[in-house]
Amino acid sequence: MADKVKTAFLLAGGCAGCEMSVVDLSEVLVDALESLEIVFWAPTVADVKYKDLEEMPDKSIDLAFVDGMIRNSENLHTVQVLRQKSKILVAFGACATLGGIAALGDLYTKEELFDQAYKTSFSTDNPDGIYPTPDYMLDGKYHLTIPAFLDNCSTIDQVVDVEYYVGGCPPHPSFVGKLVGAILAGDLPPAGSWLTCGKAVCDICKRNPAITGQERLPVGEIKRTIDGQPDFEKCLLQQGYMCFGPVTQGDCGASCLNVNIPCRGCGGPIPGIKDFGARCVSTLASSMADDATAVQFIEKYNDMAKMFYRYSHTASNLNHTIAERKEK
């Protein structure tokens, strides 16, 4: 039998939901372990230390998955070490590839974030205003350290080279299963590619008017999900619910739409899109019936950055512009 594929999983600044999608493979994962040898899975599954990773020979790991964004100094260090030890590195999930929801923190300064988290929120009891200190000497003899919070969030490919990208928050287990099979079979596209089914959410969605030969109509009224329950049989976008399905990869099988929730783009952009949020604006604007509908949209969704860049802010042109202004 050929040597097993030495595989590693690393959680950076994320919630471990992407790794739970791997665990959710259940029997598929058990079967895959006949061909995979998991040599590192931290900190989610195994109680190994980062020094164990540092001591591995360079390029000794055949395939590494990183989920989560780069948010603190520990994330940065461990991802850089894993890159050194791995032949192929996959940015796995929305946070790793695009920045994820937590990256919206970059719309604020570090000081504003810390004030909200440790001082001004209604549930905070911190009368002395103590903030986390990365380096602290306790009682003059105990040197304590914690990871330092970085000024900005980064995607994985903004700090190291990445061979492949997988979208989703988290990636759907069924797609992850197909992905593992493709990797083991060596059926991979050129380096730098997204590993995807290649179809948009609309192509997968059973609500798509094209499936039944219906004409796609312009949006005449803007709605939010709090405005009532959408019709399960009709396209959400045509009903006025803002859905990013036309420009989002459909590796999820249209999971959110199947439970009457509009797509918000966690799967990442379909091939050819460089700025996901900007393309969403363009796509939805071109779907509206008239200027009055556009005005209605702005009134209902008054925070466009958080609407259109919910998952992709770090990888966007908007983020680069904000970073430049912060530097000035």
Image: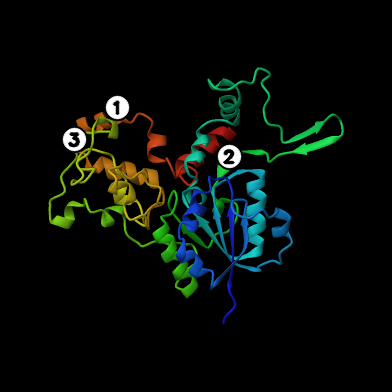
User: Residue 152 bears which disc, if any?
Assistant: 2
Callout 3 amino acid: Asp
Q: Tell me where residue 77 appears, x and y as whole percent.
A: 67, 50
Q: Which residue is mark 3?
A: 290
Judge from the rendering whether residue 24 lies leftward or rightward of residue 120; answer left or right: left
Callout 2 amino acid: Asn
User: Which residue shows up at 66% across the image and 61% down it?
Assistant: 84
Judge from the rendering whether residue 138 lies leftward or rightward of residue 238; answer left or right: right
- Mark 1 or mark 3, which is nearer to you? 1
Tell me the quarter of the image containing the N terminus.
Answer: bottom right
User: Residue 299 bears which disc, if any?
Assistant: 1
User: Which residue shows up at 48% across the image and 47% down it?
Assistant: 315
Q: Is residue 262 above or below residue 52?
A: above
Q: Is residue 105 above or below residue 264?
A: above
Front-most of residues 21 and 318? 21
Q: Image quarter for residue 176?
A: bottom left
